[in-house]
Every structure is written in structure tokens, then in C-alpha cells.
């Protein structure tokens, strides 16, 4: 299962964080800093899977943002790697060429999208239209 | 410059984010946030106003940045109970982020969740489901499980898929409730909607993992699962589920995982999956990563169930193909998988040896590491020569953190499969020359023993070593072996002619020069200088012209600051002066050293020598140092066997010998100990062991040996049978006042899981007043980042009577 999902920029600022297994607030900052350091220090020719403590990190870089996911040992890393891409593609579709600022200023919407895709540490829906359907409906409700 | 604009309390989230962004320092940011939090708190206290959801949203943002937000918990509860969707939404999100079952406030939302689960608006239902799945406590789960079951059966697919994952959480929290969901899970498999299918499969996986009986029952679903997979793999392009040409790869991976669980250890189920797995393996497009993800999962499944051999070979071939893939991620996972099966499917993996060896040159450090381990596992008698070439090549260019592991792996391989002695010696020398600084210390005695055994190669070896010595005297292990050989086989070196290498004329002065360089160099460790001095001394009987030179060297070192060297020099001086008639016999060629004699294993275990080579060297320097003279002195007294009366060994020799308890015993110097009398040989058979402590998987056993009337050595052995590794493992001991305690250095400080290695530590006690002996031991270690301490009192020591005497 997925233990947490983070989106962090190169300066180490967290733009999105979601924990599917409870982690105390005091430990979160440490964890996030560690994870970011780990990913930032990887070179271009190193693979995207890192063994970290007793679980694995899978990360992908999109421009200045790193999407990092911590998964338990029994997950298929390639599948999670694809999942990250799927998530970013969904964001892309909703925000039309998503950027870091979009995520920052629309954090609540990003959380809604994330909840539609991943629940309780497991994948719930990967079809882009289905993921975005509730949100589009909500947007209409809010306007109406 | 950021001015202190009075922030209106209901400023929208965007404004606050902008303000935070424009803060230039951490301090400024803190200021902005503190002001905002104060405003938010004030707002919360006020009665209902329009901006409530904004405030909570702002608080959640602040929380994400790492600032405390606990004062928002009650607001979450209030918001969840609100009829307005936007407020519910933020409230539930807040609950997921700020609350967990440890907070009291979480209980208060149980009722709201219950109501919302049957709300008319499916989005509200989904909020409730999502939140329950995220932070539902055991009581909440028990309370609401029937409701979830109802939703699993009768609702739309949007809700069903979420309910399924909610059920996963419930089952994790309360195992017994698994039984409740089995029928619903079973029927969900006939749904068409992929989201629901996916949720169903995850739920079934969870149910099967929790309960083996449930697993048995779900085996009947294998045909259905096979059908579904076939549909996914063989159907044409489906725009709804397509990801880069593969139809819903995420679902495929999930189903494959479930098939794996169901087919494990079961012939029948495995048989019925064989065809499908072969189909998936051959039909899946491997040009894109998604395809490879599915193939990877297929391979894992094939290798885990009882598949037929043809299928296994197919799976290993897929892994072999992965190794050639341009994408380093794929190479990495191929390596990891191959490593897991190299034990069971050795022959299949052997076929890809070439590719694996090529990966030794990969850029990525983790791929290199795995390639090294795999290569070492694939070495066999038939490929040893070619493999060793590659491994040695690797050693010369490998990253420093892998050197020690590579060196010790090479030694093991060489030992097991060496085709000839000369090859073996050459290989070991090569390793010492390339990576001498990273080898374990027992390498030196091992190599020496090997050399003595290869008697026809003595000439060749000493020439080679001499040449290596001339090139580089910084690698201590190499220098030690070289010095030893020059000392021992100096006559062969000086003779000059040798069949195996080009003849080179080495004069006595050359040889002595080489040894003296080592003696004087600041790069040489004390142990190395000991070797050099002894070798110089040995040469005194193998050369003819320069004995005076040796005499003067030896006498200079008689006043050396290093006590060990000084002692040796003094003894050798004595050998020149008083016992000159014995010198030839004393220094003659040594007998072939027997393998596995205790003199050749280090007294204190150094399981972790690979990691702490510097400290291990310091520790090991001692026994190694003592080992050389041990052999010589043994010879000395062997000769004296019958005539101990006439030639009393000088006091210097005496104290040398008394320090040799462990090493002397068992070698030819068994007589030695009888001669000196009153000297206890070290106990080589295992002393009785007593379990002193057993908690949390950590066990501590102790054994004792009486050293003298009042002296006692206690050996503590710790091992870890739990599933997690322990680090920073230390033992401390306290004894009654009159007892003297001396703790020796432990063998290491980490205890890997499942007892794969132990830590031993010796404690020397002296009980002059013969009081009742008790010892309190404090155990401390770190497990998964958290420290742990415990104390145990030991009142009885095995091998001693009740009074501790």
C-alpha cells in the first residue's frame, strides 16, 4: 500500500502532503526533509526507486516539482511509477497544463482529485474522466 | 518590503498563500502565519459566519507547512455536521488531516459519518466513506460495518468502489469482520465497472491475507479471475481503459497479485493459471513502461506459484530481456528479482550470466551492487576463470562502498573453486594489490597458510611479492604477506632463478633495503613493522654476507618507542648474543601450517569486519602481532622438548608466551604450556551456556570460565530472533563493590533480524574477596529508530558453585 504521497519542490517546500498511515506531526517535517534530500541528491542516471528505512520510495520529477510516494515493500514499483504519471496527467487535464502555482492555489481541489484516485493507500480509480467527473459536477454546483 | 497590512479575517485562501510566498525569510513567514492563526482562532470562536470553510482551508494549508493546527479539530467536527456541501467537504478533509483515532474529537464525528453514509447525495456519501477509510477507529468500524456491507451490495458503482476500499480498512482494524464481507466481495467480481473490480480485488487480497480459510474459499474464483484477465489482455483497443496501449494495466497488476496469492503452494490453482500467464507474458507489449509493469507482475507471479518449468524459463527470459532495457528502472527491478530466485532457479539465471556481468559496468550504484551480488552467486567451477577476470576488473574500478564486499566475495569464490594453487595465489595477490585496504584481517594469515601449502610455488610467490613490494608499500595486508615471504623464503629470492617468472637478480642488500624501507616508512602500521622486523631477523640465517647489517638493525630497534618492536628486537638481540648456536634452528623454514588450526582464526569474532575495517584492524593488530612469534617460540620450545632444565627461556620470552593463551593452544606449542606450568590454556570446547535474558526477540546467553582462583571470564552472547534489525546494541555491566570488572570490546553493535549474526562480548572479573558474585547487565539498542533499554540481574553463573566461587 501507499504510505504517503508528497509533492515537493527543489527548494524543499512541500506543496502537497497526504499520509495514509498516521505519522506524528513532529516526525513529518523530518521525514519530508529526509525524503527530499534523498531525491534531490539522485543523479539523472540513477533509477527512481530508493530503499529508505523499511519501505521504498518511488519518485518522479516534473520540472521543479518532485512527486514522491512511499510504498510498502510488496508493491510493484513500476506500477506505482505509472500511477504517479497518471496522477500528474489528471492534474494536467483539469488545470490545462498544470504548474506548481496551480497546485499551490488550488490545494483543496487537488486533494479532491487525489481522493478520487487513491483511497486508504490503494488505487481506487485511474480513468481520467471518471476521476474528474465529481469535481466538474461540484464546480457546477458551486457556480449554480 | 512586506508591509503590515491589517489582514481582514475572512481573506480568502489565495491571499494568504500569496502573503506566505512573498515572505522572504523564515521569520517573516512565521509572523504571517501566526497572525493568520490568531485571526482564524478568533473566527472559530465567533458564531456562524460565511467564511468558515475558508478559515478551515487556510488552517489546513498552514498545517501542511508544518505548523500546529490542533485548535481546528473541533471546527472540523462542526463543519462535518453542517448541511452545506462546501463546509462538509473542508470539514472531512480536515478530519482526515488533523484527526486520528487517538484524538477525542474523532469519536464525535461517528454520528455524522453514519448519517452521511446514507445521504441522498453520492458525493456526501463518498466523503464519509473516504474519511472512515482513512481514520476510522476500531469501534467506529464495528459500528458502521453493516452499513458498508449494504453499500457494497446496493448502490451505484461510484459508491461501491469506495465502499470496497473502506471495507479493506475495516478488515484491517477488526479482523473478525472479514467474515462479514466475504459474500459481498465474491459477488463484486461479476461487476463490469473497473473501479469496482479493482476495489473488489484489493478487498479479496486483504481477506485472503488475513485468514487462510478465506483464502481456501476464494480459490474457487480463479477461473473467474482468469476470464477477466483474458478479457483485458485479448480485447481490442478500449478508449475507456487504455493507458499507452494496455487495457487498464493497474487492474491487470492487481489481478495478477491476487492470482499469485491464490496459486501459491497449490498445484490445482497454479495449473489453471498456467495458460493465462503464458498468454500475458507473450502478448503484452513491452515497449512502454506500463507493459513492463504488467510483465513484471506476471514474472513475480510465475516464480511464486507452482508453475511448470517451461513457464519459469519464460519468466526468467523476460527478466533477462529487462536487463538489456535502456530504462535503468527496469534494469534495477530485473536485478532485484533475479537475486531472489538465483537460489531456486540457478540454471535459468546462469543463462543470463553474460548480461549480469555486463551490468557490473552500469552507471547506477544500486544496479552495480545487485550485479555484484548476483555475479558472486553465479560463480561456479566451470566459469571461475572468466568470472574472476570480470570481478577483478570490477574491483579496480568499483565504488569504495562496494570494495570490501567485492573483495571478500572474491576470496570466498577463489577458495571454493580455485582451479590451481598458482591461480589462487595470483588472484589473492591481485586483490591485495588492488584493494588491500578493504580486506578483512584474517586474509593475511589465510594467504600465508595458502602459500606455505603450495611448496612448489614458493620461489614464484616470493619473487612476485618482492616485486609488488618495490612498487607500493602502502597496502598493509600486501606488505605483511610480502615481508613474511621474504623472511621465510629469502634464500629462494636470492637464488635468482625461477621457472615461472623472468629471472631477476636480487642481492642481499636489495632484500634488506626493501625490508628496511618498510620498517622506516610512516605508512607502515605497527603490525606491519613487526612483520618486517621478524623477516629481517629470519634472513640472518638465509644470507651469508650481511649478517652484521641485520645485527645492527635489530639492535637499533632495541630502543624503539613501540613496545612490541622493542620487545622483539631485544629478544632477537638475545638470540644473536647468548643463543647464537640455536639461531639457525630457531629461524629455519617453518612447517606447513595446517588449515583450520585455531591459531588461524581470530580469537574475537569480527563478523562486522567488512564495515569497521579501521577499528577491526586496531583490535586485530594485537592477536596478529602475537601470532608470528607464537609460531617461532613454539619451535623454540619444541626443540627444547626434552631439555627444559638447561635452557631456561628468558623473562622476555616468558611474558611473550603468557599473552598467547588462545593462539598457542592447539598448535605445536601445546608443550609450551605444560612447560611453563600453572598457566591455564584457554577453553576451546564450548563452556556451558545459560540463558540470562529473553525479551522482545533479544536473547542474551552467558558462559564462564575460571581463569584463576579469583579470576573469571564471562562471555555474553546476544542474538536477535525478531523480524527487525537492531542497531547501536550495547551492554553495560555492574558488579558488587569489591569485584573488579573489565569489559572487553564487543564484536559489533548491530544485531540483524532472525538471528543471522550474533554479538559477543567478554567481561573479565576479579573477585579477590570471594564475595557472592552477582552482575547486573543493562541492554540497550535501537529498533526502527526508537531506543530501548532493559536491565537484567544475573545471580548464578554456570560453572561456578552457588557461592560464586
Image (cartoon, coloured by chain):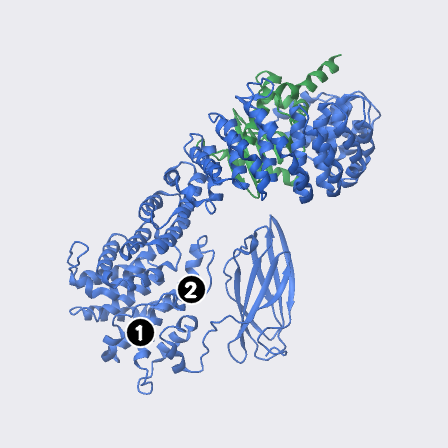
Circle on res. B602: 2
Q: Earlier in the sequence, mark 2 or mark 1?
A: 1
Circle on res. B570: 1
Chain coloured green in this rendering: A
Same chain for mark 2 and mark 1? The answer is yes
Residue A27 appears at what percent x and percent y? 64, 41
Q: Quadrant of the N terminus of chain B?
A: top right
Q: Quadrant of the C terminus of chain B?
A: bottom right
Position of A140 with respect to B661 (left or right) is right
SS of the residue under disc 1: helix
Q: To which chain does the residue with label 2 belong?
A: B
Chain coloured blue in this rendering: B
Which residue appears at 28% of the width and 77% of the height?
Answer: B574
Return the residue nearer the eye: B700 or B551: B700
Circle on res. A75: none
Q: Is residue A21 visible?
A: no
Residue lying at the far bottom of the rendered structure? B645
Q: Is B23 rendered above or below residue B433?
A: above
Residue B547 appears at what percent x and percent y? 19, 70
Residue B144 appears at what percent x and percent y? 79, 35
Amino acid at each position: 500500500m501507499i504510505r504517503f504521497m508528497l509533492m515537493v519542490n527543489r527548494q524543499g517546500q512541500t506543496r502537497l502532503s497526504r499520509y495514509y498511515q498516521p505519522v506524528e506531526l513532529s516526525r513529518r517535517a523530518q521525514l519530508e526533509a529526509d525524503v527530499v534530500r534523498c531525491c534531490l541528491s539522485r543523479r539523472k542516471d540513477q533509477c527512481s526507486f530508493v530503499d529508505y528505512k523499511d519501505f521504498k520510495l518511488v519518485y518522479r520529477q516534473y520540472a521543479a516539482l518532485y512527486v514522491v510516494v512511499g510504498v510498502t515493500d510488496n508493491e510493484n514499483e513500476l506500477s506505482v511509477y505509472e500511477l504517479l504519471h497518471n496522477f500528474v496527467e489528471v492534474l494536467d487535464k483539469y488545470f490545462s497544463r498544470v504548474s506548481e502555482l496551480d497546485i499551490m492555489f488550488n490545494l483543496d481541489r487537488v486533494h479532491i482529485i487525489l481522493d478520487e484516485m487513491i483511497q486508504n493507500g490503494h488505487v481506487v480509480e485511474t480513468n481520467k474522466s471518471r476521476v474528474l467527473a465529481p469535481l466538474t459536477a461540484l464546480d457546477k454546483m458551486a457556480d449554480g | 518590503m512586506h508591509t503590515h497590512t491589517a489582514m481582514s479575517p475572512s481573506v480568502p485562501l489565495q491571499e494568504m498563500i500569496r502573503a506566505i510566498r512573498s515572505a522572504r525569510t523564515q521569520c517573516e513567514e512565521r509572523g504571517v502565519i501566526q497572525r493568520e492563526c490568531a485571526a482564524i482562532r478568533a473566527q472559530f470562536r465567533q458564531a456562524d459566519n460565511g467564511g468558515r470553510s475558508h478559515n478551515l482551508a487556510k488552517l489546513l494549508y498552514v498545517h501542511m507547512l508544518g505548523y500546529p493546527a490542533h485548535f481546528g479539530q473541533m471546527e472540523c467536527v462542526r463543519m462535518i455536521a453542517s448541511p452545506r456541501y462546501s463546509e462538509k467537504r473542508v470539514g472531512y478533509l480536515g478530519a482526515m488531516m488533523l484527526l486520528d483515532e487517538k484524538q477525542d474529537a474523532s469519536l464525535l464525528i461517528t454520528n455524522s459519518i453514519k448519517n452521511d453514509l446514507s445521504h441522498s447525495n453520492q458525493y456526501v456519501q463518498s466523503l464519509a466513506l473516504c474519511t472512515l477509510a482513512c481514520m476510522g477507529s476500531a469501534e467506529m468500524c464495528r459500528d458502521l460495518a453493516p452499513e458498508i456491507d449494504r453499500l457494497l451490495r446496493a448502490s451505484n458503482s461510484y459508491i461501491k468502489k469506495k465502499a470496497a476500499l473502506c471495507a479493506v480498512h475495516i478488515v484491517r482494524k477488526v479482523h473478525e469482520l472479514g467474515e462479514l464481507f466475504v459474500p459481498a466481495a465474491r459477488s463484486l467480481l461479476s461487476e463490469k465497472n473497473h473501479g469496482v473490480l479493482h476495489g473488489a480485488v484489493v478487498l479479496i487480497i486483504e481477506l485472503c491475507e488475513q485468514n487462510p480459510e478465506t483464502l481456501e474459499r476464494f480459490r474457487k474464483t480463479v477461473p473467474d479471475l482468469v476470464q477477466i484477465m483474458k478479457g483485458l489482455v485479448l480485447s481490442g483497443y478500449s478508449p475507456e481503459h487504455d493507458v499507452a496501449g494496455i487495457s487498464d494495466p493497474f487492474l491487470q497488476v492487481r489481478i495478477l497479485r491476487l492470482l499469485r496469492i491464490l496459486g501459491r503452494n497449490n498445484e490445482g490453482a497454479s495449473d489453471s493459471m498456467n495458460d493465462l500467464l503464458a498468454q500475458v507474458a507473450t502478448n503484452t507489449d513491452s515497449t512502454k513502461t506500463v507493459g513492463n509493469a504488467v510483465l513484471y507482475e506476471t514474472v513475480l507471479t510465475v516464480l511464486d506459484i507452482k508453475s511448470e518449468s517451461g513457464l519459469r524459463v519464460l519468466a526468467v527470459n523476460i527478466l533477462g530481456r529487462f536487463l538489456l532495457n535502456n530504462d535503468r528502472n527496469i534494469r534495477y527491478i530485473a536485478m532485484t528479482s533475479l537475486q531472489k530466485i538465483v537460489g531456486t532457479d540457478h540454471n535459468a539465471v546462469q543463462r543470463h550470466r553474460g548480461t549480469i556481468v555486463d551490468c557490473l559496468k552500469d552507471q547506477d550504484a544500486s544496479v552495480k551492487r545487485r550485479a555484484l551480488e548476483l555475479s558472486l552467486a553465479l560463480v561456479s567451477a566451470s566459469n571461475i576463470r572468466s568470472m574472476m577476470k570480470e570481478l577483478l576488473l570490477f574491483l579496480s574500478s568499483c565504488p569504495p562502498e562496494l570494495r570490501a564486499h567485492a573483495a571478500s566475495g572474491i576470496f570466498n569464490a577463489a577458495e571454493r573453486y580455485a582451479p590451481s594453487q598458482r591461480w589462487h595465489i595470483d588472484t589473492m595477490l591481485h586483490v591485495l594489490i588492488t584493494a588491500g585496504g578493504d580486506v578483512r584481517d584474517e586474509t593475511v594469515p589465510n594467504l600465508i597458510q595458502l602459500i606455505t601449502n603450495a611448496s612448489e610455488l614458493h620461489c614464484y610467490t616470493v619473487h612476485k611479492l618482492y616485486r609488488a613490494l618495490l612498487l607500493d608499500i602502502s597496502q598493509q595486508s600486501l606488505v605483511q604477506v610480502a615481508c613474511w615471504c621474504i623472511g621465510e623464503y629469502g634464500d629462494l629470492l636470492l637464488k635468482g632463478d625461477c621457472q615461472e617468472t623472468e629471472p631477476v637478480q636480487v642481492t642481499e642488500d636489495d632484500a634488506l633495503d626493501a625490508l628496511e624501507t618498510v620498517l622506516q616508512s610512516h605508512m607502515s602500521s605497527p603490525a606491519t613493522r613487526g612483520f618486517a622486523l621478524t623477516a629481517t631477523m629470519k634472513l640472518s640465517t638465509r644470507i651469508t654476507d650481511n649478517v652484521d647489517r641485520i645485527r645492527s638493525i635489530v639492535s637499533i630497534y632495541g630502543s624503539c618507542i613501540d613496545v612490541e618492536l622493542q620487545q622483539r628486537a631485544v629478544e632477537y638481540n638475545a638470540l644473536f648474543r647468548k643463543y647464537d648456536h640455536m639461531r639457525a634452528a630457531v629461524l629455519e623454514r617453518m612447517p606447513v601450517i595446517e588449515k583450520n588450526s585455531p591459531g588461524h582464526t581470530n580469537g574475537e569474532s569480527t563478523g562486522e569486519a567488512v564495515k569497521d575495517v579501521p577499528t577491526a584492524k586496531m583490535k586485530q593488530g594485537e592477536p596478529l602481532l602475537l601470532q608470528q612469534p607464537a609460531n617461532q617460540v613454539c619451535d623454540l620450545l619444541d626443540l627444547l622438548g626434552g631439555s627444559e632444565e638447561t635452557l631456561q627461556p628468558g623473562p622476555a620470552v616468558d611474558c611473550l608466551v603468557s599473552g598467547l593463551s588462545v593462539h598457542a593452544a592447539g598448535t605445536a606449542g601445546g608443550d609450551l604450556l605444560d612447560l611453563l606450568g600453572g598457566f591455564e590454556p584457554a577453553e576451546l570446547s564450548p563452556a556451558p551456556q545459560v540463558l540470562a535474558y529473553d525479551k522482545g526477540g533479544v536473547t542474551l546467553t552467558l558462559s564462564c570460565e575460571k581463569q584463576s582462583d579469583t579470576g573469571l571470564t564471562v562471555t555474553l552472547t546476544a542474538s536477535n530472533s525478531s523480524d527487525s534489525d537492531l542497531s547501536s546494541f550495547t551492554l553495560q555491566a555492574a558488579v558488587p563493590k569489591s569485584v573488579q570488572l573489565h569489559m572487553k570490546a564487543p564484536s559489533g553493535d548491530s544485531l540483524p533480524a532472525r538471528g543471522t549474526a550474533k554479538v559477543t562480548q567478554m567481561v573479565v572479573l576479579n573477585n579477590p574477596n570471594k564475595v557472592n558474585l552477582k552482575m547486573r547487565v543493562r541492554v540497550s539498542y535501537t529498533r526502527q529508530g526508537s531506543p530501548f533499554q532493559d536491565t537484567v540481574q544475573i545471580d548464578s553463573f554456570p560453572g561456578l558453585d552457588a557461592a560464586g566461587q
